[in-house]
Image (tube, rainbow, N blue to C red):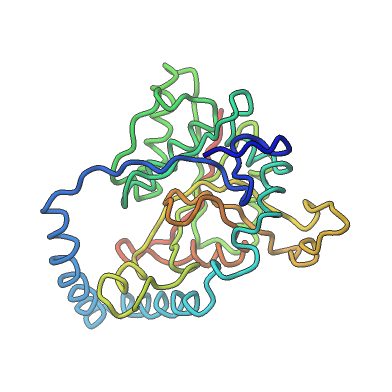
Amino acid sequence: KKQTDTNNPPYLHSTSSQLIVSHPIPPAKTLNHYFLIYAIFPVLAPAFIAFKSITNSDFRKTSFSLYSLVSGATANPITKEWYFQDKELLDILWSKVPSAKCYVDDAIGEPRLEYQLSEGYCGSATQRCILRSFGLSPESIPAQKNGETKPGPWCEHVCQMAKEATEGNMELETTIVGGDVDYYKFLETLRETAKEPEKSRIAVNFLRPALTGFSGFRFFPMNFILGLLGGHFSPVLGLIENDTVDQPSSSIREKIEGDNPLVAIWDTNHKYGGAYFVPAKRLYESVKALDLSSNKNRALIVVKKK
């Protein structure tokens, strides 16, 4: 239900300052899906990881590194930090950050964001969010689909989608900034892109458990595997720097470090409640984390209109 407080936009919840975005109806799951996820995967995946860890020293080193990273996040998840979904920060985000405002259509009072239909649809949902923020209608863009999990093909497809939806009138270019760059290059990419809201967006491919930790009992096979392999795509809404906060009475400004601004993420999985904040240095670690399936870093993806 939309709130009616005239002091706030109609697309924001009055109590939380989160965008009002409907939860999608997930596609029906088949018996084969449940058999694969709850019977085959929990047996074969741990066996595969154990075998690779024994026979491949690089895989073993990466697995231990990821386990250490996610264990640290389990002890100190961003979900329990003051900034995670702080209402004052969200108010600042939607009112003062130009890159975030691109994801709202003020003319009709509606968000240009959506949640993924189901697990595995995050890459496709992120594409649609970014294209909608450029002004494309939801109906003109292909529906969400499973897959779109690798930065390279993701870039090719988002450019193709924009071109086809506009009959060639919108052309995009993409730049992949991998997690193997140093932190200050990573931060520079976030900052420079945020300065061009009229033509630039950022998607992030990251290991979300590096921010939130293991789900449930970590040694339950499914939880353990998803903790190490739980890659995710989401749009980056913008940055909250300490000089973004201009209220003299606010204590937030003092909490934000100059070289570690807060990054606003729109999590395409509705279970995480929409937009949240993460310090740039922690987001960097989650992007730097290697993808065990490919042994490659995850990445920021800059999407720019030509």
Q: Quadrant of residue 164?
A: top left
Furthest-right residue in this view: 248
Q: Quadrant of residue 108?
A: top right
Residue 269 visible: yes
x, y percentage for residue 57?
Answer: 30, 80
**Residue at image coords 48%, 55%:** 299
8 or 68: which is nearer to us? Answer: 8
Furthest-bottom residue in this view: 54
87 w.r.t. 213: above or below: above
97 left or right, relative to 133: right
Q: Quadrant of residue 277?
A: bottom right
52 w.r.t. 15: above or below: below
**Residue at image coords 15%, 60%:** 36
x, y percentage for residue 106?
Answer: 63, 28
56 w.r.t. 134: above or below: below
x, y percentage for residue 196?
Answer: 67, 37
306 or 220: which is nearer to us? Answer: 220
